[in-house]
Image (cartoon, grey):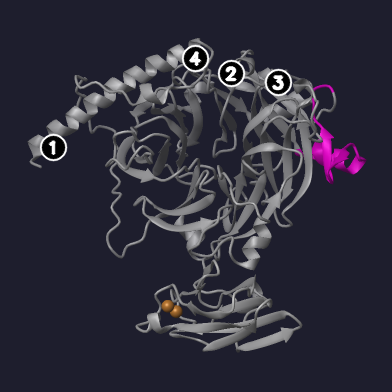
Amino acid sequence: MSKNNRDNHDNEKRGKQLDRRRFLKMLGVAGVAAGAGMVLSKDVLTNSSKDGLVAKAEASNGMGEQNMEVKPGEYDQYYGFWSGGHSGEVRVMGVPSMRELMRIPVFNIECGKGWGITNDSKKMLKGITVGDTHHVHGSYVNGTYDGKYLFVNDKINNRVARIRIDIMETDAILQVPNIQGAHGLFPQRFPKTEWVVLNSEFQVPMPNRSGVDPKDYYGAHTIIDAERMAVVCQVMIDSNIDLAGTDYQGKYSFATSYNTEKGVTISEMLANDFDYLHVFNWEKIREALRKGNYKTINGVKVIDGREGKSDIVLRIPVPKNPHGVNVSPDGKYAVCSGKVSPTCTVVEISRIEDAYAGKIKPADCIAGQPEIGLGPLHTTFDGRGNAITSVFIDSTNVKWNLDRAVKGDKKPIVDVLDISYQVGHIMASMAETKEADGKWMVSLNKMSKDRFLNVGPLKPENEQLVDISGEKLRLLHDSPAYIEPHDVIIVRKDIIESKVKDRFNMFEYSVDAATTNSVDRKGKDVTVRLTANAPVFGLSEVRVKKGDRVTFHVTNNDEIADLTHGFALENHNISFTISPFQTKSVTFTAEKPGVYWFYCTNFCHALHLEMRSRLIIEA
Ligand code: CUA
């Protein structure tokens, strides 16, 4: 395409977008006015008109000048850890290249690595085969990432998983009782991550049973021991709690809440003009646990945090059905994004102590309430005193100045970036740490519509890379994303790189590691230890009898980095990979007599195709 043609094409495309954008805004306003929030019809969303406006050329003034290109053989500056939504996984991306580096199966069945196929992963998944990951966060020391763990929630089955960063594999999954819609998750930031908090978005009877009036449904702020991966306690409260955050002092955790109305329909949930930012006082939680001020429900200590029942929870009124709560990197402010209100509410964390002491009202903790746009959802930070908020209905990212907001400026807007389209989470590099560096930001947009080649009725999402190093927000790149990332953290590579291993510690990770080959029988239980060294398995045949319960422990004995083998057994629904010095095990019953080849699935050698042996099931 010639430059002129390309410009025309771009302008035409931009014109269409502007047209659609205006239409969506009108729709959004009407939606809010009708009290229906952001329930948008997809039929209407995809309508477009050909005679749109032509966008004005952007001034280059104030734009950042970073280059996102990562040349062949070069590395990215950042690791991005993405949730995978209802794909149930976590993805590792390079930032700024936006290249997908790895996928980490968590709550899903994944036949590449054999997650949900091998004994270890089956034990963690306990037969549950769906999950909805929303928020990935790293473990902290002194307000920044320590590169040890990632934590991620499952909204469908109310679980929290922990991923070991050194091997980039899930190493624990915790089932949390008494809650539904396990959503906001955040680790303790200071002095280090001992606790992880988890918010339940849906209120339910506690304990769960039928025949309960919705007024007796509750939400809970669950506290999890990060090392033991066990529930410490739950604080039961009277509303849906949504996103979570923690302070930089180890004193408080935060939860936005909506549905203080305790409604079960949309209109009921939108009745009140104010909901709350809930603040949870950790010293008071410890005190309640020490004094035994809790009930045990389904084996979990449940503290009553309802209004008038304890002084653990501070309720700061925030308009209206707020969504994200994000703490500024200097630790001073918790910013709530108003969702149904066009405002962000800036809470000054240092005032919270006085509010607990009754010296000021909870509302007096609010230091500013600027107007941001229609449907503010999440806020991130550049570490230079600016906040950037995702605005769903407007389809914008809005940069605004915190200082101006707390000095009373109702419109402290620095820049507005149109995005495509309907943004959810945004995240700037290192923005959830005290080391926020204001370099890159990713805008996770829920809809891509016409931004990519058409791939059928299900479109990818659109993740847009933004250079935030200048005064203005500069859009650099669109990436399609498969169902359905919600959130991301962007972590400086030096924090992660040195922690990541090239091979497993053979016996630390599996007591069943096989360095020699053997077949042992105890009654009907047959245990096979099998080595994999390119290009051979250690046994050329294994004989078992019909009805035997067979366990294969397969160990990759190749030390060379990147030399991963696979193990797949014909007609037995078994396949997994084993990386250098890794062991995985499977157990199955030998049912049909015959000859079954097991082969290496992962290209490892010039004779990779020949890397196979036979399992013979005798009648
Ligand atoms: Cu081992 Cu291919």
How crowded pointer 4 is (Cα within 10 Å; few <14, some 14-19, many 20+) is rated as some
Residue in the foreground of this view, choosing between 20 and 223? 20
Residue in the foreground of this view, choosing between 586 and 279? 586
Mark earlier in primary sequence (1, 3): 1
Describe residue 507's horizontal placement relative to residue 384 as left or right: right
How crowded pointer 1 is (Cα within 10 Å; few <14, some 14-19, many 20+) is rated as few
Mark earlier in primary sequence (2, 3): 3
Q: Which residue is mark 3?
A: 262
Q: Residue at x 49, y 21 (%)?
A: 38
Label drawn at residue 32: 4
Element assignment for label 3:
loop
User: Alpha carbon of mark 1 to alpha carbon of mark 4: how far?
Assistant: 38 Å
User: Alpha carbon of mark 2 to alpha carbon of mark 4: how far?
Assistant: 11 Å
Mark earlier in primary sequence (1, 2): 1
Image location (x, y in percent) of residue 550 = 66, 77
Q: Which residue is mark 2?
A: 320
> Do tag 2 and tag 4 residues touch (Cβ < 8 Å)?
no
Image location (x, y in percent) of residue 380 = 49, 36
Q: Amino acid at mark 3?
A: Lys
Mark 2 within 8 Å of ligand 1, using the beta carbon = no
Q: Would you say residue 345 sits in the magenta stretch?
A: no
> Do tag 4 and tag 3 residues touch (Cβ < 8 Å)?
no
Q: Amino acid at mark 2?
A: Lys
Residue 394: name its quadrant. top left
Describe residue 264's horizontal placement relative to residue 130 as left or right: right
Q: Which residue is mark 1?
A: 6
> Do tag 1 and tag 3 residues touch (Cβ < 8 Å)?
no
Image location (x, y in percent) of residue 294 = 88, 37
Q: How many marks?
A: 4
Describe residue 186's horizontal placement relative to residue 237 as left or right: left
Element assignment for label 4:
helix
Which region shows up in magenta?
A: 282-308
